[in-house]
Amino acid sequence: MAAGLLPRFDNFFDLFRIVIWGTFVLGLAYGIIRFVILVLKFRGSDDWPTVDGKTIGPGQVKTSYNDRSVDYDAEITYEYVVNGTSHRGTYRLKSFKQKQQAESFLLEHMPEGTAVVVHYKPEDPGTSMLELDPYEFDDDEPISLNLEQKK
């Protein structure tokens, strides 16, 4: 290979800086592209039709690695039927710092057979999203107004 084809770096830190910035720019571009794809995929999902579904299996704990920590995500698989065709989807509910917490959460809040409301995309019923009340699983619950609830 001809020596003139490769850039010449007088300083190791120039090369290091270019590699770091290049990695940062590629990571940022990947994140933006992934976000845009998800927005386009689920755009208008609040207006999609709904069907009843149920969780299948015991739920799984997925490990995700962040900059300085490890999170354990509680994920469920659910099943629903549209026009006589059965479909499945997965949904990540909540992250925990300890695997035991995620496992306990799944057993307590989302055991197998739990009823869920599923929004599905009319043009592609295999694309779906769950309708969940975020306060149902959050420690930051709204202030109680002491109103009677219908049973």
Image (cartoon, grey):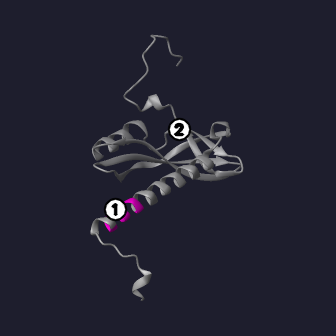
The picture places residue 44, in percent across and down from the top left corner, at 65, 40
Secondary structure that dominates the magenta span: helix
Relative to residue 103, is residue 15 depicted above or below? below
Residue 97 falls left or right of residue 43: left
17 magenta-colored: yes
Q: Which residues are magenta?
A: 15-22
Dot 1 alpha-carbon crowd within 10 angstroms: few under 14, some 14 to 19, many 20 or more = few
Query: Identity of the amino acid at label 2?
Result: Ala
Residue occupying image coordinates x 54% and y 55%: 33
Left or right, 65 with reference to 79:
left
Q: Depth check: 98 or 150 in front?
A: 98
Q: Residue 116's quadrant in the figure?
A: top right
Q: Circle 2 sits in a helix, a strand or a loop, which is it?
A: strand
Indicate which disc residue 115 carries.
Answer: 2
Q: Residue at x 43, y 47 (%)?
A: 75
Q: How many marks?
A: 2
Q: Position of residue 10 (x, y in %)?
A: 30, 72
Left or right of 110, for residue 151: right
SS class of the residue under badge 1? helix
**Marker disc for residue 94:** none
Reply yes or no: does residue 148 show up in magenta: no
State whether residue 151 is above or below residue 50.
Answer: above
In this rendered view, identify the residue nearer to me: 18 or 39.
18
Q: Earlier in the sequence, mark 1 or mark 2?
A: 1
